[in-house]
Image (cartoon, coloured by chain):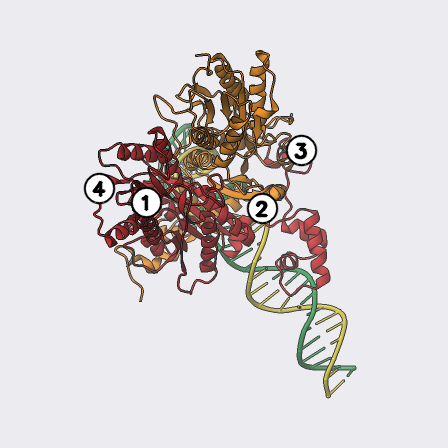
Chain colours: A orange, B red, C yellow, D green
Amino acid sequence: MRLSAPNTALTLDRSETVMNLKELSQNLGLSQTTVSRALNGYPEVSARTRQRVEQAAKKFNYRPSTRAKGLATGQALAIGHVIPLSTKHEMVNPIFGDFIAGAGETYAREGYEMMLSIVDDKDQEQIYRNLKSRQSVDGVVVHAPRMNDTRIPLLQALGLPFAVHGRASGCDLAYTWLDVNNRSAFARATDYLCDLGHRRIALINGLEVMDFAHRRRMGYAASLAARDIALDPALMRSDEMTEGFGYQSAREMLGSSAPPTAIVCSSMISTLGVRRAIEEMGLKMGRDVSVVTHDDALSYLQNGGDKPIFTATRSSVRHAGRRLAKMLLHAIAHPGQPPQSELMEAELMIGRSTGPAPGKG
Amino acid sequence: MRLSAPNTALTLDRSETVMNLKELSQNLGLSQTTVSRALNGYPEVSARTRQRVEQAAKKFNYRPSTRAKGLATGQALAIGHVIPLSTKHEMVNPIFGDFIAGAGETYAREGYEMMLSIVDDKDQEQIYRNLKSRQSVDGVVVHAPRMNDTRIPLLQALGLPFAVHGRASGCDLAYTWLDVNNRSAFARATDYLCDLGHRRIALINGLEVMDFAHRRRMGYAASLAARDIALDPALMRSDEMTEGFGYQSAREMLGSSAPPTAIVCSSMISTLGVRRAIEEMGLKMGRDVSVVTHDDALSYLQNGGDKPIFTATRSSVRHAGRRLAKMLLHAIAHPGQPPQSELMEAELMIGRSTGPAPGKG
DNA sequence: GCACCTATCCAAAGCGCTTTGGGGGCTTGT
DNA sequence: ACAAGCCCCCAAAGCGCTTTGGATAGGTGC
């Protein structure tokens, strides 16, 4: 016997069937053409008729089938997000949640859907070809671009509209992108530490095949170079930004014979590991070791308010999602126009994790 | 004047055009029927012809249009994931990334696509009705069920196949679900602490309108009750599981006149905040304060290997994603069958964050 | 009163696929 | 040699929508 919840009793029967345009128009005694036009805001329909149609549509809970509409119009009203899966740790970048939440807001507002594929690097090309030839999306967002990323020329060749979250150094094509100014952010972070008297400044970075990580290192290096501080390979680490990586790196570097007095770290998550290492070693963050991190403003990892825990270069990845989605939809709606791009400056927020270099206060 | 039609724009070579069945079959000198059958593995096609067709399809990079195929078959070959956005902090649950990575694996293997909507609670019902009437998905995954969750009867009434990640207490309908045994996990965690001599054990829990959080508290309470330890409201917190919440709660409770000697925490993220509080107060985790957390085995937050940092009840949310996706696809493929469900036991991993109660070692 | 608009509405042709209902050839059995 | 039986293949209908190219009716101007 089927149990019935409060309001389901009557709906169970009719519920399985979905009303279509034909039925709706028969119901109204109108042609499909007129009903379609009424609902899509065409002018060839009298106000009275339009109102009747809209009421009936609401009453019968009618909404056009995406598939049929797409087939007829040639649009998918969907955007694909292809999220690369880091093969090494099978890691899904923790920022995707927030980025996608931002993008999703925009899509919802514009009537688009979001299609997600999480794929291994080796399958990337196939996926894009699939998306194109199956025509399941009107465009795609490229996540986590690498240096000389091959996806960009591929998408351009395929003629599938796309927008990149970040940029790809070494790729001189024109395309739609939105990026944080990683270079200047990390230069400023390093400058700030230098100004506090630090000379041995470590960099705990993401994988440097990733474009953002490469740019961050450039910024870091430029800042040190400007003060004639030589780069010390022993103070530079680069890997996937897990908590464990931050811990491990900090632990090793701080335990070495020539430890850094400050650390610049590429991710809040890794920074949590850095803090763990610092405290485990009986040091005090902000006094014995200064830390600057990059903060993507993730919803579950707020870096304090007035007095942030960490000094950080801050840029909301969620906001980036919203913006980039808009840019892509714009590009899709105006195919002729040259691609837009946007470079956002991160703000340097001074928190409690930095202080004068030991012995220089 | 009409602007350049879609395929005449700045057409980079041939790329803009996508081959369709008609062209492919003309190219082969076969009917669409035969080509379609050849590609879909029907037996009415000779091996030789099938091979010819497959080769041509590969050569021309032909793949059937999802829309057209869906329209013809009535299937969407897509699953919807509707992710509720916590209105309070606009927070996207950090476990979604890993869950979705797991589910995505299954979908990819079975030829399904994943459709994501991130929506405010108030729009939930509309979204599900939309998904149903637009027929854009064959089924949906319900995330983050609450107690007496209204989505379950709604989906049942709509006749849209669904699977729930978790369960909804108070909902006595039969439906497909997969859950961790939260109650037993937290009972065991609490038992373990009690066995170590702890009597003042705090609970830092998720929002208790969420079903999982409610069950966890039940487990915690049952364990204490079994030892005649009274519940102390001052030791129980419940909110969204951010790092800040963990910090705040631990800070306040540990700083009170009757502090806990142990803490059970519902999330690794919050636990990082708990650790921060502990260390900031000059206490030592595992000696002054014991901590047990629940570990969803997120890819970027590994809890050590042989000697985990945290004692934890562990259950891979990614594995849950894989499994639940399979169960949903099964339900879709076999509409008549009664719903499956699966209760996974979390394993209790002993780490370095727990030790005998102070003064009882 | 007649030609001419304008305002509304409609029938029918696709969109690209699957699937039904045949229908030619070629092999068998007798 | 003829009918039956297969094996392969095809033409055409249909999925639910949009859109083209009229058609109809009522109002206008002369």
Q: Are marks 1 and 4 in contact (CB under 8 Å)?
A: no
Q: Which element carries disc 4, helix, strand or loop?
A: helix
Q: Are marks 3 and 4 on the same chain?
A: yes
Q: Amino acid at mark 1?
A: Gln
Q: Are marks 3 and 2 on the same chain?
A: no
Mark identifier at residue A55? 1
Mark identifier at residue B233? 4
> Cα distance, mark 4 to mark 2?
57 Å
> Cα distance, mark 1 to mark 4?
52 Å
Q: Quadrant of the C terminus of chain A?
A: top left
- Residue B90, visible in the rendered structure: no
- Measured from the top left, where is residue B101 in percent x and y? 50, 45
Q: Which element carries disc 1, helix, strand or loop?
A: helix
Q: Are marks 3 and 1 on the same chain?
A: no
- Measured from the top left, where is residue B121 in percent x and y? 33, 41
Mark identifier at residue B12? 3
Q: Amino acid at mark 2?
A: Arg
> Cα distance, mark 3 to mark 2?
19 Å
Q: Are marks 4 and 2 in contact (CB under 8 Å)?
A: no
- Work out whether residue B295 or residue B40 is closer to the camera in this orientation and state it: B295
Above or below — where is A62 with respect to A223?
below
Residue at image x 46%, y 23%?
A291
Mark identifier at residue B360? none
In the displayed structure image, the side of residue B70 where residue B179 appears, left or right: left
Labels 3, 1: front one: 3
